[in-house]
Image (cartoon, rainbow, N blue to C red):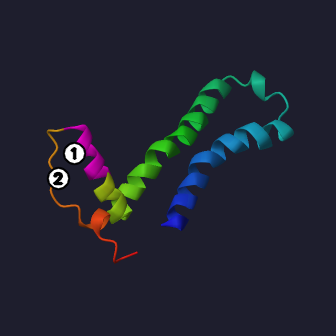
Amino acid sequence: MVILISALFALCWLPLLILINVIPEFYPNINSWEYILYLWWFAHGLAMLHSIVNPVIYFIRNARFREGFCYFSSKLLPCVVFKEFRLLTDNSKR
């Protein structure tokens, strides 16, 4: 799971880092490009998407995270019912 999270981090942040740090070295007049603002917003949005993708990956791949999320949801929203919390209360697996 660490490799997956790291790969998604690189995939999400690399376009913005290249746009900010690498491209201006080779193209100093990058600010005069017609579509640079759209390109920057796309790269920035992709970088911020990592904040959304990361918990989703943890929810899909980690049973303890999933159970903790369901427990928190059941306390926050009374209409959500989740009866079994065996991973959160079982200390023998640690």
Q: CA distance from mark 2 to mark 1?
A: 6 Å
Q: Position of residue 53 (x, y in %)?
A: 45, 48
Say which residue appears at 85% left-offset and 40% top-offset: 25
94 vs 19: above or below: below
C-beta proximity under 8 Å, tags 2 and 1: yes
Mark 1 residue element: helix
Q: Does residue 6 appear left or right of residue 32 in this picture?
A: left
Q: Position of residue 90 (x, y in %)?
A: 29, 70
Question: Dot 2: few (<14), some (14–19), or many (≥20) neighbours within 10 Å?
Answer: some
51 vs 1: above or below: above
Q: Amino acid at mark 1?
A: Ser
Which residues are drawn in magenta?
69-77
Q: Is residue 70 magenta?
A: yes
Say which residue appears at 62% left-offset and 46% top-offset: 13
**Residue closest to the eye, 76 or 22:** 76
| Number of disc labels | 2
Say which residue appears at 62% left-offset and 32% top-offset: 39
Q: Does residue 72 appear left or right of residue 48 in this picture?
A: left
Quadrant location of the C terminus? bottom left
Q: Position of residue 79 (x, y in %)?
A: 14, 39
Question: Dot 1: few (<14), some (14–19), or many (≥20) neighbours within 10 Å?
Answer: some
Question: Along the polypeptide, which appears first: circle 2 or circle 1?
Answer: 1
Q: Which mark is residue 74?
A: 1
Name which quarter of the figure residue 34 lies in: top right
Q: Amino acid at mark 2?
A: Phe
Q: Main secondary structure of the magenta part?
A: helix
Q: Which mark is residue 82?
A: 2
Name which quarter of the figure residue 26 lies in: top right
**Residue closest to the eye, 10 or 54:** 54
